[in-house]
Image (spheres, rainbow, N blue to C red):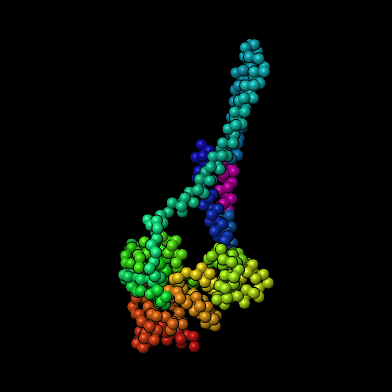
């Protein structure tokens, strides 16, 4: 009965506690925006409501625990009283001695004392089961990519080839990618440009085997991407993303994420190539400087340079740059491209961007629109024609001017 009565409250407790924790983290991380929009009272009301709900559930659980304790005590006393009612006449008639009566009474009370923790244990069990259900929902989720490969092939080179690639997020949704075809030779550079939402980042997630592609081909080094284990694919591809995650630790710890066995010389070499070494040397604690959650103590350009240093340290033969200079000012962007040029040397590179900057050095530029490649060619060739690329380039140039 205790378990049945506790089941629903304990499940609610786990859910509401998770909601309150998420709301608190959200409020702390977005505090600056809440203050800027004068919405602190709204968030405070939301937290107060969740906290009150949590308190009500906890009070209900405490009442159940108190009821269990009271019932347990009542049953123990009733059992002792019943034993005395039966045993006292036996003692009076001489059929039971006083010592045996005391032993029986103590044994009865000891039996109830032994089972007294059971209701609390059932309550704790329901609490743990509620938390475990949330955890197992994640553990038991079907992976987006099902692997059957035990040993990955050895690529003949580090070329990337995409042929007739199609992908949609849901069965009835419009295609995010529709018939994408291109090839990057080993050591080549290709830029994929287009407006936000045109499918650029979707392609990155497919190349990194985060999602499965149902139609078309992706080949790495002459072999279908499905022939490789996902971890082997990611070992060959380095990524500088638009929003690189930086951990709440030191500069050194964030660098060692890419290569845990790197020595001091390798770390400083990567920082030099990413044009971040002088900045780090001027810090009082150097590479032991704490950068805060998401690198909050660094500027946007410094965070991106740190991401580049991390990829340099990993030294992968294939490189994907997904909006590497987004949200940076023009001067920082130009300085950062020098570090990116160093990073791209001798590597197969796919640059994904909506900012048409420094694309003259690309072997080919692909223009993506609504999941399709609508134009392709060299930067100078695309500018010679009345093309979408030319209109995008002129518009961005006018805005910068």
Where 211 sits versus 299, above or below? above
Residue 39 appearing in the image: no
Where 221 sits versus 124, above or below? below
Asked if residue 53 is among those painted magenta in the image, a careful observer would answer yes
Residue at x 60% of width, y 35% of height: 70
Asked if residue 328 is among those painted magenta in the image, a careful observer would answer no
Classified by dominant secondary structure, the portion drawn in magenta counts as helix
Residue at x 49% of width, y 51% of height: 135
For the image, the number of numbered tags is 0
In this rendering, would 243 be left or right of 80?
A: left
Q: Residue 130 appears at what percent x and percent y?
A: 50, 47
Residue 25 appearing in the image: yes
Q: Residue 217 appears at what percent x and percent y?
A: 33, 67
Q: Residue 185 appears at what percent x and percent y?
A: 38, 75
Q: Residue 141 appears at what percent x and percent y?
A: 42, 54
Q: Which residues are magenta?
A: 52-64
Residue at x 49% of width, y 40% of height: 4
**In front: 231, or 165?**
231
Residue at x 52% of width, y 71% of height: 312
**In front: 92, or 232?**
232
Q: Quadrant of residue 116?
A: top right
């Amino acid at each position: 009965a205790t378990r049945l009565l506790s089941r629903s409250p304990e499940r609610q407790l786990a859910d509401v506690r998770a909601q309150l924790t998420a709301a608190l983290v959200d409020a702390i991380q977005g505090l600056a925006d809440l203050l800027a929009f004068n919405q602190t009272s709204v968030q405070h009301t939301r937290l107060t409501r969740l906290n009150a709900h949590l308190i009500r559930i906890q009070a209900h659980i405490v009442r159940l625990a108190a009821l269990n304790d009271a019932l347990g005590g009542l049953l123990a006393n009733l059992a002792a009283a019943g034993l005395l009612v039966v045993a006292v006449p036996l003692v009076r008639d001489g059929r039971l001695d006083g010592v045996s009566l005391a032993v029986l009474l103590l044994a009865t009370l000891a039996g109830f004392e032994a089972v007294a923790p059971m209701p609390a244990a059932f309550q704790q069990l329901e609490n743990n089961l509620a938390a475990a259900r949330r955890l197992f929902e994640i553990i038991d989720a079907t992976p987006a990519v099902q692997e059957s490969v035990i040993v990955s092939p050895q690529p003949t080179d580090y070329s990337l080839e995409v042929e007739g690639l199609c992908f949609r997020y849901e069965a009835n949704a419009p295609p995010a990618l529709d018939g994408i075809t291109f090839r990057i030779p080993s050591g080549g550079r290709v830029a994929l440009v287009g407006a936000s939402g045109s499918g650029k980042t979707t392609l990155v997630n497919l190349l990194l085997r985060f999602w499965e592609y149902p139609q078309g081909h992706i080949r790495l080094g002459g072999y279908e991407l499905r022939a490789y284990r996902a971890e082997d694919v990611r070992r060959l591809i380095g990524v500088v993303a638009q929003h690189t995650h930086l951990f709440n630790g030191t500069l050194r710890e964030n660098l060692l994420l890419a290569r845990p066995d790197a020595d001091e010389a390798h770390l400083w070499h990567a920082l030099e190539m990413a044009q971040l070494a002088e900045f780090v040397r001027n810090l009082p604690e150097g590479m032991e400087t704490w950068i805060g959650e998401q690198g909050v103590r660094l500027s946007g350009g410094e965070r991106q340079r740190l991401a580049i240093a991390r990829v340099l340290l990993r030294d992968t033969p294939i490189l994907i740059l997904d909006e590497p200079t987004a949200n940076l000012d023009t001067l920082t962007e130009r300085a950062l491209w020098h570090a990116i040029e160093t990073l791209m040397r001798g590597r197969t590179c796919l640059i994904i961007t909506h900012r048409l900057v420094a694309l003259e050095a690309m072997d080919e530029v692909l223009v993506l629109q609504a999941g399709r490649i609508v134009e392709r060619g060299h930067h100078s060739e695309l500018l010679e024609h009345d093309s979408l690329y030319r209109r995008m380039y002129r518009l961005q140039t006018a805005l910068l001017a």
